[in-house]
Amino acid sequence: MLYNSTRDNNAVVSSSEAIASGISKEGGLFVPQSVPALSAEDFANMKALDYVGRANYVFRNFLTDFTEEELKYCTEGAYLGSFDEDRPAPLKALNEKVNILELWHGPTCAFKDLALQILPYLLTTSAKKVGGGKKTVILVATSGDTGKAALEGFKDVKDTEIMVFYPNDGVSAMQQLQMNTQAGENVYVCAINGNFDDAQTGVKTIFTNDEVKTLLDKNNMGFSSANSINWGRLAPQIIYYISSYLDLLDKGEDYLKDGFNVVVPTGNFGNILAAYYAKEMGVPINKLICASNSNNVLTDFINTGTYDRNRAFYTTISPSMDILISSNLERMLYELTGHDDKQVSAWQNSLKNEGKYTVTPEILAKLKDIFYGGCCDEEGTAETIKNTFKKHGYLIDTHTSVAVNVYGKYVEETGDDRPVVIASTASPYKFANSVLEALGLEVPADEFEAVELLSNKTNTAVPAPISALKSATVRFSNVCNKEDMNKVVLDRLGIKG
Ligand SMILES: *Cc1c(COP(=O)(O)O)cnc(C)c1O
């Protein structure tokens, strides 16, 4: 299996090269040249396996230059011992039709753990194959959850340094505390005066800056990315959609006779793109329902064919989805156009220069055939948390709530009530204040009192990683301007510019 860049079909790399470099040198993202198909026999084989076994099965198709031993080293290291009961992605049925895919049983209580627990293994294995003993410097732009999950995954991993940038005032108090208390010798955390898109653009600019790259090279270092622009982030996410399908098969032969829908609370378009690849591989997914918060640039795109980031940016109670440039959409465009690198480059240029682009009517028709786009405002998010708890006794976080809300709109609009899997992307305890408020409860000033109160009022358990934060030491309080990110990086690495 080889990979192409979305902006240059002549850039062809192996999976380890794609993972080690993170992004193609002209700024494109790596995409498999073809999507492997799984047969009925494959699914039957995988059904009998645990999560690690299922992961190996899927990776064998994508990471073809990894040996069987290397794959096992990666999957066992990532998925054994770091998730509740070694079940990274359990399904919970709310009723006959609605199934919640709980993706927050890892060390940082968000779905990012499913990819970021394994990325350090994939990356160091890849770097050994292609990098020739260079130190890997991981730069991360985060809207909250990626940063912590990446720090936790990479802490004290040999021959790596990790630096995380997050928008000051753009993450929840708990998210900020999670990052600023991070342990490890090779970690660094800095807030920037700007929003997530500024952080992401800043990181992308550093990645593609030749001068900086040369400086790193001289010091025997190389950049890579832990953001979902890295194929090593995306591939692991395909696994849990396949795994959820295998689990749904337990419900009997008839249950999936018309397939099932998948709802994903979306920001950067990584998670839902993984669901798309699962569908392409043969999982009987009907519609992919893309749920956005008030930053509904994707809803408009799916409905009109125009992607336009020239709009107000809202800071919401689902901060991990406060994004106006969904970088993984670029991969989707590449797939929809049948790998047309020129067309994708033109649209990305237009996005960069004018902040928008419009796809052709044919591409729009294809997009609408696969996706449904919907959005939910702050009030709707809060109401859905309250109603879901009242109706099902099930507590959801603010991001999952956006998904549940948009799913309701989808059913109302289309009448399509076939079985559904809703991706639950974070524990409600990461956003305890907003969840308490949604339930109509008084929010205490202290974050940990809020957590206690939420637990008492809803009779749900506080995840251990959240309780542990209470006694953790704050190690970082850095803030910088977005123009200075370059210098911050070089200073931290001890390189003179
Ligand atoms: C990152 C994140 C999302 C958005 O996922 P994308 O892959 O960026 O679309 C949704 N919910 C939570 C809790 C997240 O951390």
Image (cartoon, grey):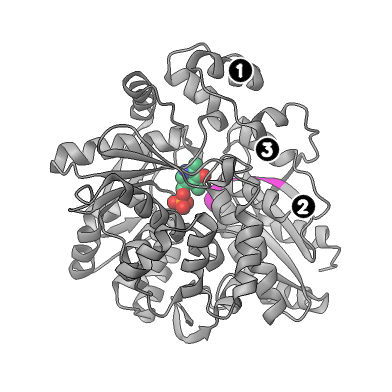
Mark 2: which secondary structure? strand
Lower position in the chain sequence, tag 3 or tag 1? 3
Which residue is found at the position 62% from the left and 48% from the top?
Answer: 149
| Amino acid beneath label 1 | Glu
Label 1 Cα crowd, 10 Å radius (few <14 / some 14-19 / many 20+):
some
Residue located beneath label 3 in the image? 178
For the residues labelled 3 and 1, the Cα–Cα distance comes to 17 Å
Instruction: Confirm or deny contact between disc 3 and disc 1 (CB under 8 A).
Output: no
**Residue at 52 percent of width and 22 percent of height:** 460
Residue at the disc numbered 1: 452
Identity, as a three-letter code, of the amino acid under mark 3: Gln
Q: Position of residue 496 (x, y in %)?
A: 85, 67
Q: Quadrant of residue 72?
A: bottom right
Amino acid type for the residue under numbered disc 2: Val
User: Contact, CB < 8 Å: mark 3 with mark 2?
Assistant: no
355 or 233, nearer to the observer: 233
- The label shown at residue 187 is 2
Relative to 311, residue 127 above or below = below
Q: In the displayed structure, does residue 159 sit left or right of residue 409?
A: right
Query: In the image shown, does 481 or 213 lie closer to the viewer?
Result: 213
Total labels: the figure holds 3
Residue at 52% x, 34% y is: 427
Cα distance between the residues tagged 1 and 2:
30 Å
Which region of the structure is painted magenta? 190-197
* x, y percent for residue 253: 22, 51
**Of the image marks 3 and 2, the number of the one nearer the N terminus:** 3
Q: Earlier in the sequence, mark 1 or mark 2?
A: 2
Where is residue 80? Give x, y as percent.
Answer: 63, 52
Left or right position of 186 against 241: right
